Amino acid sequence: LNVSPEGVEKDEALLEIYVDALDPLKSSLGEVHTEIGLVYTKIGHLYGKKRDLDLSLLAYKAALKAYGEPTSTTLLGGMHPEVLSVWVCVTEHLHSMGRWDEVIVAGERALFFLRLAKKSLFRDAKLYTNHSNVSSASDIAIVKTSKKSRIQ
């Protein structure tokens, strides 16, 4: 957490840039798009750094909608890796706010996506091991590591 005056000014400037970028991005890309979700996620992170949990939570919820949540677990062919991270942030913020019933719901949703990501990781690793171009166990380990790092 950068609480120096320069860090705070930089965060404020970034926040202004991201908020100003939303309307043009939405008009060109639509409401449900990965790029819109990423911008809302960054806004949520910056408000969280300022400890404005209400606005951070609103931004994270908007990010989830932009990623296609809660009506769909897929967007553009699969779950965006950031969805799990956003649900974890939502859960943490709700916990900090003492909104216990909502913590349970958000935490369960985060666990759902964690399990989904885990299944996807193992399914993809298994598919890779069935390919003829796998030459060794070290190749399999590399695939598992690279897939795992993408969901963390």
Image (cartoon, rainbow, N blue to C red):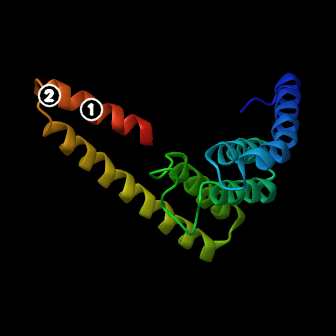
Task: Give the CA separation, mark 2 to mark 1.
Answer: 10 Å
In the picture, the disc for residue 65 is none
- Residue 132 sits in quarter: top left
Image quarter where the N terminus lies is top right
x, y percent for residue 108: 48, 68
x, y percent for residue 87: 57, 57
In the picture, the disc for residue 134 is 2
x, y percent for residue 74: 48, 57
Depth order, front residue of 61/104: 61
In this view, the residue farthest toward the front is 28
Q: Secondary structure at mark 2?
A: loop
Q: Label 1 sits on what residue type?
A: Val
Image quarter where the C terminus lies is top left
Residue for badge 1: 143
Q: Label 2 sits on what residue type?
A: Val
Q: Secondary structure at mark 1?
A: helix
Q: Eyeballing the image, is 109 above or below 144?
A: below
Disc 1 crowd rating (10 Å Cα; few below 14, some 14-19, many 20+) is some
